[in-house]
Image (cartoon, rainbow, N blue to C red):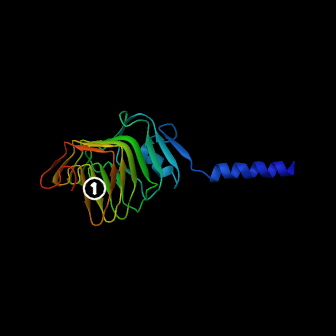
Amino acid sequence: MKKLYKVLVSTVFIATFGFGTTINVPADQSTIQAGIDAASDGDTVLVAAGTYVENIDYNGKNIAVIGADRETTIIDGDSVGTVVTFENGEDSTAVLSGFTITNGSSEYGGGIYCNNNSSPSFENLIINGNSADKGGGIYCYNNSDVILAHSIIIDNNSASDGGGIWCGDYSNPIITNTLIANNYSGNYGGGIY
């Protein structure tokens, strides 16, 4: 009996601490940012379909934030800043997937802002209707090597450069199976600068 008890305790310990926790929005936390704030590295924030009017920041956490479907799960920045921010060295295990990112407005990166060696992974996103001075859709700076796959970057605009995507200062994105179309730039790189 003692042996069985030790095995059960070990199994519960591994199940509890060996794998990441799943946080459901809005069932467990009312907003996506609250879900991120409650998460730790390796956790997953699952977001139900709906429109979430907020601006979120991963705050250096290597977590996955996954929407129900990019057509029905929308993060709306309400034209008050960047919609999604990565600026604390997040790596490729920081994942954003299954969302429409829209209505962001900022000096740098209307839709998504990546800086300071932040290299998250983006998949199955629609990034549209965002604006910035640089990087209407996505802004990557200072060794931010994002991975972007199976996404649509459309109808974003930049007053200066990089309507769809702006990359600089040794940032080298990996982009696969992604449509970049109908973005506008005042100077250079309507699609990508």
Q: Label 1 neighbourhood size at 10 Å, few (<14), some (14-19), many (20+)? A: many
- Give percent across and percent down for residue 106: 24, 52
State which quadrant residue 54 falls in. Answer: top left
Task: Write the residue at 29% across / 48% down.
Answer: 111
State which quadrant residue 179 falls in. Answer: top left
The residue lying toward the viewer, choosing from 18 and 52, is 18
Task: Please say whether residue 128 is visible from this viewpoint.
Answer: yes
- Give percent across and percent down for residue 47: 45, 39
Task: Write the residue at 17% across / 53% down.
Answer: 189
Q: How many marks?
A: 1
- Give percent across and percent down for residue 115: 33, 61
Amino acid type at image mark 1: Tyr
Task: Please say whether residue 102 is visible from this viewpoint.
Answer: no
Q: Is 145 drawn above or below residue 22 in the view shown?
A: below
Task: Write the residue at 52% across / 44% down.
Answer: 23
Please, what secondary structure does the residue beneath circle 1 have?
strand
In the drawing, does residue 3 fall left or right of residue 110? right
Task: Write the residue at 47% across / 49% down.
Answer: 64
The residue lying toward the viewer, choosing from 4 and 149, is 149
Q: Residue furthest right?
A: 1
- Give percent across and percent down for residue 46: 48, 41
Q: Residue furthest front?
A: 177
In the drawing, does residue 7 fall left or right of residue 73? right
Q: Residue furthest left?
A: 187
Q: Which residue is mark 1?
A: 139
Q: Is 105 drawn above or below residue 115 in the view shown?
A: above
